[in-house]
Image (tube, rainbow, N blue to C red):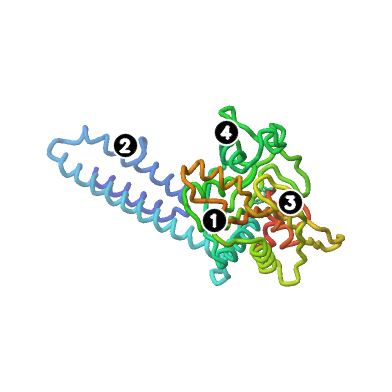
């Protein structure tokens, strides 16, 4: 009996040694240790072994199983190592790694950060306000009468609650003055929403940058100087800027500012980038009523305000001819800002 176990072990170890792949190794394992494997069957014969020899038989059986199992494990490791080496054989590990695509800031982010940088150097601090606004902060306090077209449902996104998506960042003017006494010098970049027809220069969700300066001696030349300086810092000293008289309910006098847009292959055209003006005393009155004090006494303080279209500024800065490029996220467009 013991001799036959020795024979089985020798044959199994030889088959294991000869296995050239994991499949062949598995065949060798089944042939000896499987349900009908040679060692399994030999083991089943223990019942026929005379009692005196049973212990010795069992020992040699276990020894054979241990040796075969160890050989199987060792051979499996060797085969895997060989397979790994073969897989790596065709690879030149000295080649440089494949470059990962590099992301970049969106042009709107770039222009917003540049604008903020210039205005902060001029002494403006960042302010903020909600995009879902109430009529008081978006219209009433800004001296906008109930029948003003901007308040029309055709032009403004209203919620059933009566709240609305702010149509401009000017609401932050009110929110700032409500919480902070003069002097004030703030800028508020953010989104604004209008039910506009979308075309090459209009989006229904767009980006503005509001500015407000209020103090004892702020005049129209301060407004003009600030904005001209700002636009030339942003676009270069040769930038052509024009102020056109306009009307806004919350400023008096009011202006629109145009900058000349030059796109290669197109005739230059003026593009409106901002509205601005001197804060209307009616706005100070509304703020005082809301604050329940007279901190913004129209006889003691004056101020200027402006609201710029950041999307338009980006168009001028880089000669972008269609505003929709800014929201389509076409990487062929965005890559150019990397
Ligand atoms: N809120 C105005 C607009 O969106 C711009 C503006 C801001 C005008 C501040 C005057 C003063 O068109």
The quadrant in which residue 316 appears is bottom right
N-terminal-most mark, 2 or 1: 2
**Mark 4 or 3, which is nearer the eye?**
4
SS for dot 4:
loop
- Viewer-proximal residue among 25 and 128: 128
Q: Look at 56% across and 48% down and name the residue there.
A: 284
Q: Look at 48% across and 59% down and name the residue there.
A: 84
Q: CA distance from mark 4 to mark 1?
A: 33 Å
Q: Which mark is residue 163?
A: 4
> Where residue 171 sits: x, y (%)?
58, 45
Q: CA distance from mark 4 to mark 3?
A: 28 Å
Residue matched to label 2: 41
- Viewer-proximal residue among 256 and 48: 256
Q: Are marks 2 and 4 in contact (CB under 8 Å)?
A: no
The quadrant in which residue 27 appears is top left
Residue matched to label 1: 300
């Amino acid at each position: 009996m013991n001799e036959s176990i020795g024979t089985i072990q020798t044959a199994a170890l030889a088959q294991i040694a000869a296995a050239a792949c994991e499949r062949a190794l598995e065949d060798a394992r089944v042939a000896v240790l499987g349900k009908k494997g040679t060692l399994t069957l030999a083991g089943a014969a223990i019942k026929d072994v005379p009692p005196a020899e049973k212990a010795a038989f069992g020992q040699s059986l276990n020894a054979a199983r241990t040796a075969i199992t160890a050989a199987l494990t060792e051979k499996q490791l060797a085969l895997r190592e060989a397979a790994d080496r073969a897989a790596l054989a065709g690879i030149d590990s000295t080649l440089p790694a494949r470059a990962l695509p590099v992301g970049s800031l969106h042009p709107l982010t770039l222009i917003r950060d540049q604008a903020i940088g210039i205005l902060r150097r001029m002494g403006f601090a960042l302010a903020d306000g909600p995009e879902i606004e109430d009529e008081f902060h978006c219209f009433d306090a800004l001296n906008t009468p109930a029948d003003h077209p901007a308040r029309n449902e055709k032009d403004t996104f209203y919620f059933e609650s009566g709240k609305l998506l702010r149509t401009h960042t000017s609401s932050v003017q009110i929110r700032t003055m409500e919480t902070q006494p003069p002097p004030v010098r703030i800028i508020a970049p953010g989104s604004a929403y209008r039910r506009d027809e979308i075309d090459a220069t209009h989006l229904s969700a767009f980006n503005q940058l509001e500015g407000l300066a209020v103090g004892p001696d702020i005049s129209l030349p301060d407004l003009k100087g600030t904005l001209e300086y700002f636009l030339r810092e942003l676009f270069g000293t040769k930038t052509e800027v024009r102020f056109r008289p306009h009307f806004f309910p919350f400023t008096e006098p009011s202006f629109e500012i145009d900058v000349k847009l030059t796109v290669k292959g197109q005739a230059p055209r003026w593009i409106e980038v901002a509205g601005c003006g001197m804060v209307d005393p009616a706005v100070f009155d509304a703020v005082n009523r809301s604050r329940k004090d007279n901190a913004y006494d129209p006889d003691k303080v004056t101020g200027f305000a402006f609201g710029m279209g950041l999307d338009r500024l980006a168009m001028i800065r880089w000669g972008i001819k269609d505003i929709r490029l800014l929201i389509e996220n076409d990487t062929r467009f965005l890559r150019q800002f990397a």
